[in-house]
Image (cartoon, grey):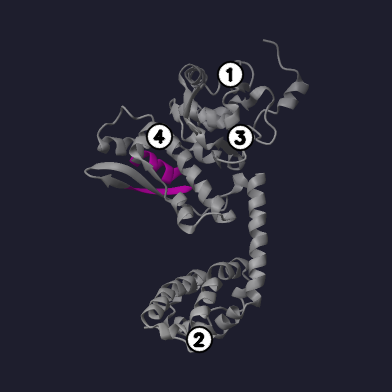
Amino acid sequence: MTSIPKNEQNQKQVQILNELSKRKVVEHNSLITSIAKMDKTPLKMFELAVSCIDTEEPPKDHTVYLSKAELFAFFKVDDSNKHTRFKQAVENMQKQAFFKIKEKKEHGFEFENIVPIPYVKWTDYHDEVTIRFSPEIMPYLINLKQNFTQHALSDLAELNSKYSIILYRWLSMNYNQYEHYSYKGGRREEQVEAYRNPSISMRELREMTDTVNEYKLFTNFSKKVLDKPLEEINDRTSFNIAYEKVKKGKSIDSIVFHITKKRRADDNSYKLEDKTYKEAKAEKELSNQTLAGKALESRYTRLLLENFLLSPYEMTDTSLMAGLQKNVYPKYDELKTLRGLEGVKKHLSYVREKQEPYSKGNVAKYLKKAVDQYLPTVKLQDLDQPERASVRGKGASHE
């Protein structure tokens, strides 16, 4: 094989993995919910290759280039046998690895079996590795406008089990939707929370993890596919995951996962160059500024100040003021309709008397909870005593 001309090498730009925290993997959700017929090494190699794709400018000839040295670093391989192991991993990926994709169409389901990377080229005297994706896999990796997920490559680098990788991708898919609708709106609160607490049937989970014919006893399944992989995810990624079993009769029917994100300074570093993320972030900031501006002009803000439920310093917090305007003040409007402004004043006076020190850490959440608990009582009183509904401005005591 002839050596690659220097100018062509410059055009190809061998990918550098030194800053894994800034790299992301973007995939269509159908790929994440598909059956990955491969072990952990080909799956990780595929994810690594996908992270090299610029989704805005797809690679020419479906080809990306990796540095062999950095690839070994990604897999944390430094022994003398690493070249042989790399060759074996490539052969396994090409001969055995494929995705079984199932997509719902108008008249039923469509099934595809796709070998994602049919061509890999490298030498024993050069650092570059050429990886070419199949044309069939590319629609699941480029020009994605909806139904896609992105996750941090650095998290995947830490996972050493096929099941932990599969679960991490699926959990990321759900948490991505939770973050998206938390930013953009368009879903009811319970729908948004369902993305953070996703449920999957045992049948779907077994299909996705390719364990339909394995670990027949649930105790074995939970140990191999759930407990150990989730322990690894919790220890090594940005997620903390818990799960609970849902029974139907005597058997386990489904699993509900509970996802929380660890607070880290670099939580979203891999998203910072992402156009969609930046647009959503800018849109939310603009929306918050507008909401906060309205809150500053609201009479309810003045009442909160008078009752020492809000301080002048807290009024400089755009996020807090936006939260009050969006989530709390509409409730006060509702209470005002039922009991007049005097009713709102008496409610806030009562809340002030009962306020606990802990509540000052999240004022908007505390005030929303207080009025949410009170409004049903007011409405029930109006049903029981219709004459009270006609009285405005006299207020109502909290029983």
Q: Measuring 60% from the left and 39% from the top, which residue is drawn there?
A: 23
The residue under label 3 is which amino acid type? Leu
Q: Which residue is mark 2?
A: 392
Does label 2 or label 3 sit earlier along the sequence? 3
Q: Which residue is mark 3?
A: 17
Is mark 2 in CB contact (under 8 Å) with mark 4? no
Q: Position of residue 177 (x, y in %)?
A: 52, 48
The residue under label 2 is which amino acid type? Arg
Q: Do we see residue 339 in this rendering? A: yes
Q: Nearer the viewer, residue 120 or 150?
A: 150
**Residue 238 within the magenta-colored segment of the rendering:** yes
Is mark 1 in CB contact (under 8 Å) with mark 3? no
| Boundaries of the magenta span | 227-244
For label 1, the SS is strand
Q: Nearer the viewer, residue 149 or 75?
A: 149
Does label 1 or label 2 sit earlier along the sequence? 1
Q: Measuring 46% from the left and 35% from the top, which residue is drawn there?
A: 33
Total numbered labels placed on residues in the image: 4
Q: Which residue is mark 1?
A: 120
The residue under label 1 is which amino acid type? Val
Q: Do we see residue 101 in this rendering? A: no
Q: Position of residue 188 (x, y in %)?
A: 50, 57
Left or right: residue 302 compared with residue 390: right
**Number of residues whose C-alpha sits closer than 10 Å to that of mark 3, classed few (under 14), some (14–19) or many (20 or more):** many
Q: Is residue 322 above or below residue 176?
A: below
